[in-house]
């Protein structure tokens, strides 16, 4: 065991190579169980569920721990660094969150965990977690690593571990088994539909039949870096098959032995659950009769975007509104073109750079509540070589087709049907945790480059002269850059790494993530002129 205090860093070594190479964690407080073992070879972030011991009565206190496994810098790719951080129990800024916007309680558990305990106790609440109406909670894994069922089967994949079983009753009861559906947190847009009419044992046949046209829709969406599973009521058309199926379900007898049966002595917790189900059914019936339950299309839209009935309420909404809305700004610049003439110290015109059809657009919010978008478009870029007797008069330009005559269909020179260069950067709205996600794309069309030795030498001399002038302008000494050499000391890489690691709790916890970086391919045509002897006219500029 290793005890790591807040902000500390400690090395970790395997104590026994014969044991499975898995790591468990728990807070250094009394009453907590060890978390499930996770694999250090799996890079990335992983949420661990931390539970209390069975002897602790308050089992409703659930907390999660975010684990970030990454390659340690300076180890040649063989060292691993583990960062641990608590997550908000309400799911604010957590990796995964569950929100219940329906009047029914939703019971959930990680798929693959025993849901039907065989003990004589009728306490089925310990086999799963429950989220009350209007509640929200973080979701994490009780089993973050699971071996395959057979000898030749690989361990469970990330998608398998993120499967969640959801129901409208405890998973160990008959109603829970009949209403259970499985959904994956890894697939955005996936939906499940839980049927309240299958709670007929609690509601009775008449009330269950009245709720045949109601479903509790569960949909996986995103809230910044957080993956969210939202539940909301939806209305469904009642078909004859659903009526017949609900009636046949009442005739099933006997109940299988692994599912709970009704008894005259109902525990206090079970009686409380029955009262909540009846209250939820009454509220649902009232909403159905008044036409306030959305159809599937509208309910899916609200659940996906977190609007309407899926908006944050209570303290979460107050916290969100306390920051204000912010001001919206946008700016658009359009230029027909720019021409830059490059003149050396002779003075002689070295080259001419021309940019045509330039557009720049930017929009942002002062508080980061909306997407910040930036886009730059350049229709044409061309660099003309003005060296005397240059073999290629154009040094850089977009590639021209075989039938290109220098004009487009409108007779406009230096233009293409599509822009030559497009650069776009989008930054997602700032999450309440301060995390931002950006996407970038660069699109460049085919281009042609023409070079010759005289042009390269003149450009090199021009750049060195500019550097010399800059150093002289800031008070430095004159340098002869062609023949000069400077010695640079070797940096202390290990010291820099230790200094970075010693910062403590923010190790590995980034605030900006790149969601997508797209660079479209293009073809480059490179032409280099053969070396030729300088003419007398060129010697006057280039020297012997």
Image (tube, rainbow, N blue to C red):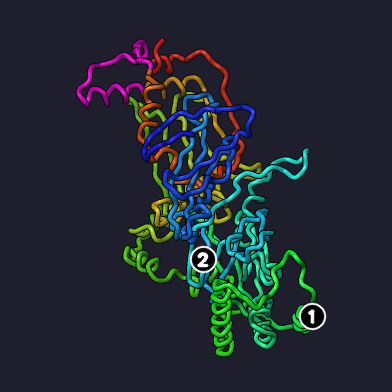
Identify residue for label 2. 99
Question: Can you give x and y, in whole percent of width and height, for residue 261 in the image?
Answer: 70, 72
Q: Residues within 10 Å of mark 1 (few under 14, many from 20)?
A: few
Question: Can you give x and y, in whole percent of width and height, for residue 150 in the image?
Answer: 77, 42
- Above or below for 445 versus 322: above
The foreground one among 526 and 37 is 37
Instruction: Look at the image and say whether residue 78 sits in the magenta stretch.
Output: no
Picture residue at 55% right of the left edge, 43% below the top: 444
Question: Can you give x and y, in whole percent of width and height, for residue 203 in the image?
Answer: 64, 82
- Above or below for 481 versus 388: above
Residue 219 appears in the rendering: no
Picture residue at 35% right of the left edge, 11% below the top: 485
Instruction: Look at the image and say whether residue 488 sits in the magenta stretch.
Output: yes
Q: CA distance from mark 1 to mark 2?
A: 35 Å
Residue 251: mark? 1
Tell me where the magenta segment starts and ends, as one range: 464-490
- Quadrant location, the C terminus: top left
Q: Say how many tags the image has.
A: 2
Query: Which badge, 1 or 2, is on the more N-terminal residue?
Result: 2
Q: Residues within 10 Å of mark 2 (few under 14, many from 20)?
A: many
- Give the prevailing secondary structure in the magenta stretch: loop
> Where on the picture, by quarter, is residue 467?
top left
The foreground one among 91 and 441 is 91
Q: Is residue 488 left or right of residue 447?
A: left
> Where on the picture, by quarter, is residue 370?
bottom left
């Amino acid at each position: 065991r290793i005890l790591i205090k807040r902000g500390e860093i400690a090395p970790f070594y395997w104590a026994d190579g014969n044991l499975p190479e898995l790591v468990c964690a728990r807070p250094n407080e009394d009453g907590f169980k060890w978390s499930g073992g996770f694999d250090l070879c799996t890079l990335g972030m992983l949420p661990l569920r931390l539970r209390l011991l069975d002897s602790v009565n308050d089992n409703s206190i659930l907390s999660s721990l975010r684990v970030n496994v990454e390659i340690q810098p300076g180890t040649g790719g063989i060292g691993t660094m583990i960062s641990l951080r608590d997550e908000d129990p309400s799911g604010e800024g957590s990796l995964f969150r569950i929100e219940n916007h329906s009047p029914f309680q939703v019971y959930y558990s990680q798929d693959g965990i025993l849901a039907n305990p065989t003990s004589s106790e009728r306490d089925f609440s310990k086999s799963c977690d429950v989220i009350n109406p209007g509640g929200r909670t973080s979701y994490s894994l009780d089993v973050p690593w699971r071996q395959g069922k057979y000898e030749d089967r690989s361990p469970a994949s990330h998608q398998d571990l993120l499967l969640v079983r959801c129901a409208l009753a405890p998973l160990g009861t008959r109603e829970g088994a009949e209403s259970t559906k499985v959904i994956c947190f890894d697939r955005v847009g996936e939906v499940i539909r839980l049927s309240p009419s299958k709670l007929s044992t609690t509601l009775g046949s008449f009330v269950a039949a009245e709720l045949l046209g109601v479903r509790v829709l569960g949909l996986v969406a995103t809230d910044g870096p957080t993956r969210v599973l939202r539940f909301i009521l939806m209305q469904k058309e009642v078909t004859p098959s659903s009526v017949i199926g609900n009636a046949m379900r009442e005739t099933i007898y006997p109940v299988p032995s692994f599912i709970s049966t009704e008894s005259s002595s109902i525990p206090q917790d079970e009686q409380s659950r029955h009262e909540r189900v009846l209250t939820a059914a009454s509220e649902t019936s009232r909403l159905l009769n008044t036409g306030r339950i959305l159809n599937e299309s509208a309910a899916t839209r609200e659940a996906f975007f977190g609007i309407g009935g899926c908006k944050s309420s209570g303290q979460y909404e107050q916290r969100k509104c306390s920051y204000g809305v912010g001001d919206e700004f946008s700016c658009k610049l359009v230029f027909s073109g720019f021409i830059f003439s490059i003149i050396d110290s002779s003075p002689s015109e070295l080259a001419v750079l021309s940019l045509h059809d330039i557009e720049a657009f930017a929009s942002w919010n002062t508080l980061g509540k909306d997407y910040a978008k930036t886009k730059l478009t350049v229709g044409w870029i061309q660099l003309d070589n003005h060296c005397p007797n240059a073999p290629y008069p154009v040094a850089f330009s977009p590639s021209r087709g075989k039938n290109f005559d220098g004009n487009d269909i409108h007779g406009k020179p230096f233009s293409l049907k599509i822009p030559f260069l497009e650069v776009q950067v989008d930054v997602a709205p700032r999450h309440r945790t301060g995390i931002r996600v950006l996407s970038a794309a660069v699109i460049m069309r085919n281009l042609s480059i023409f070079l010759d030795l005289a042009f390269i030498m003149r450009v090199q001399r021009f750049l060195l002269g500019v550097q010399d002038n800059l150093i002289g302008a800031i008070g430095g000494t004159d340098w002869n850059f062609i023949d000069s050499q400077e010695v640079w000391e070797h940096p202390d890489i290990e010291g820099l790494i230790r200094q970075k690691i010693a910062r403590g709790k923010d190790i590995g916890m980034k605030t900006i993530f790149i969601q997508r970086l797209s660079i479209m391919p293009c073809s480059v045509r490179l032409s280099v002129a053969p070396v030729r002897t300088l003419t007398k006219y060129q010697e006057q500029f280039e020297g012997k």
